[in-house]
Image: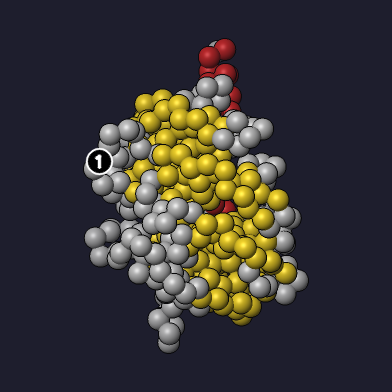
């Protein structure tokens, strides 16, 4: 009798610990993906459920949540092509059982849309367009739907690594916590641009001094320490992480560290970077070497010390996320069409062996729901 009573209790406890996770994908010619997928992650056991299609959409490569409304946004290819052949920003309602319903889409005001971010007020979405190197901000109405563009900017120039740096290639957009600045890593120009941001108008001001990487580095994505005193920029082309101090729109480069082991000469490019929730460790992913690089972070100086190169469990780790408990890392392998779960020791920062691998077509982004 006792077992009969407690068994349902444990099942309920496991259900309560399950967190929904949304999966952005690539829907190109070689992919079987149909859009955005959804799965549940149990932080007690590290189990990830088999993903199911949440909603159909073309190439929803990166995802973001509204700060207060049950809305999810994706950048991709529009259902109805725009006259200028630009990419799109689409909005979806999050409904029962975490299902998604398409609400509408607008132009990203650029080509090759690859990244987006929502500001703290939920009134602006910022977009990076890799293809033509432009970035834009789009106003969100009171219901959270994207409306008109507020600012469209395109950088100019090139870099030494041809053809990857044949022109500007905006690869990410990030708001600071104060909601006063927007940061834009540009892979083609070896710079992280800094723009003043007006949350009331959704407009960007005249750019401030940019953070410059080594020539040919190719900055892709970035992250900050929780106190925003330090920034970490992962460079796709030379497989490095740039460490910089940061104060109110101003960066100061401190040091650069490698992501690959000494002596590794095969082709590899970096992709994602994230600071552990407790601030003691930083993680980066290597596509080609197919690994996750782990650094210990000095919380006073911001400097990084390499402590591990961990196999990621698949091919081409395009994106990864540390779960909210800080005890697991989920890695999306675009090349092998899988997601693996790796245990994470919060005391040491070290990752365990990849496990609980599930199949999903061409995963490019992982997003935990609230």
Which is nearer the eye, 198 or 159?
Answer: 159
Q: Which colour scheme is used?
A: secondary structure
Which is nearer the eye, 367 or 299?
Answer: 299
Which is nearer the eye, 189 or 151?
Answer: 189
Say which quadrant the N terminus sits in: top right
Q: In which quarter of the image is residue 193?
A: bottom right
Which is nearer the eye, 35 or 243?
Answer: 243
At x 69%, y 67%, the residue is 197
In the displayed structure image, the side of residue 200 where residue 3 appears, left or right:
left
Labels in figure, total: 1
Q: Could you say where residue 248 lies in the image, as x and y percent from the top left?
A: 72, 55
At x 53%, y 14%, the residue is 3
Q: Quadrant of residue 143?
A: bottom right
Q: Could you say where residue 8 lies in the image, as x and y percent from the top left?
A: 55, 25
Q: Could you say where residue 82 lies in the image, as x and y percent from the top left?
A: 44, 83
Q: Up-down: is 155 above or below 15?
A: below
Q: Residue furthest top?
A: 2
Tell me the SS state at disc 1: loop
In the displayed structure image, the side of residue 357 where residue 320 appears, left or right:
right
Q: Could you say where residue 148 lies in the image, as x and y percent from the top left?
A: 61, 80
Camera sees residue 227: yes
**Residue wearing tag 1:** 265
Within 10 Å of the Cα at label 1, are there few (<14), some (14-19), or many (20+) other Cα atoms? few
Q: Up-down: is 188 above or below 313?
A: below
At x 50%, y 66%, the residue is 128
In the displayed structure image, the side of residue 202 where residue 217 appears, left or right:
left
Camera sees residue 77: no
At x 48%, y 62%, the residue is 186
């Amino acid at each position: 009798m006792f077992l009969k009573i407690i068994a349902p209790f444990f099942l309920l406890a496991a259900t309560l610990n399950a967190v929904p996770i949304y999966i952005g994908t690539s829907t190109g010619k070689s992919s079987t993906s149909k859009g955005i997928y959804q799965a549940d992650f149990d932080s007690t056991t590290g189990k990830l459920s088999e993903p199911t299609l949440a909603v159909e959409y073309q190439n929803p490569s990166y995802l973001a949540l509204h700060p207060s409304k049950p809305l999810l946004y994706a950048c991709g290819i529009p259902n109805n092509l725009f006259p200028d052949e630009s990419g799109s920003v689409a909005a979806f309602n999050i409904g029962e059982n975490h299902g998604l319903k398409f609400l509408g889409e607008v132009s990203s005001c650029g080509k090759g849309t690859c990244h987006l971010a929502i500001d703290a007020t939920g009134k602006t979405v910022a977009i990076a367009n890799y293809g033509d190197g432009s970035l834009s901000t789009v106003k969100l109405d009171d219901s959270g739907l994207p409306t008109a563009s507020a600012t469209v900017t395109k950088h100019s120039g090139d870099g030494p690594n041809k053809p990857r740096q044949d022109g500007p290639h905006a690869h990410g957009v990030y708001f600071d916590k104060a909601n006063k600045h927007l940061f834009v890593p540009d892979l083609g120009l070896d710079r992280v641009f800094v723009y003043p941001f007006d949350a009331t108008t959704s407009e960007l001001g005249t750019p401030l001094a940019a953070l410059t990487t080594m020539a040919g580095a190719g900055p892709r994505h970035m992250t900050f320490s929780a106190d925003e005193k330090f920034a970490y920029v992962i460079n796709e082309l030379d497989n490095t992480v740039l460490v910089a101090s940061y104060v109110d729109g101003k960066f100061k480069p401190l040091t650069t560290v490698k992501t690959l082991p000494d002596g590794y000469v095969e082709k590899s490019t970096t992709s994602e970077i994230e600071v552990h929730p407790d601030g003691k460790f930083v993680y980066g992913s290597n596509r080609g070497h197919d690994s996750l690089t782990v650094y210990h972070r000095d919380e006073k100086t911001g400097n990084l010390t390499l402590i591990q190169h961990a196999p990621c469990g698949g091919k081409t780790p395009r994106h990864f996320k540390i779960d909210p408990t800080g005890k697991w890392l989920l890695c999306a392998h675009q090349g092998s069409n899988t997601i693996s779960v790796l245990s994470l020791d919060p005391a040491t920062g070290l990752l365990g062996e990849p496990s609980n691998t599930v199949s999903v077509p061409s995963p490019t982004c992982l997003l935990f729901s609230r």
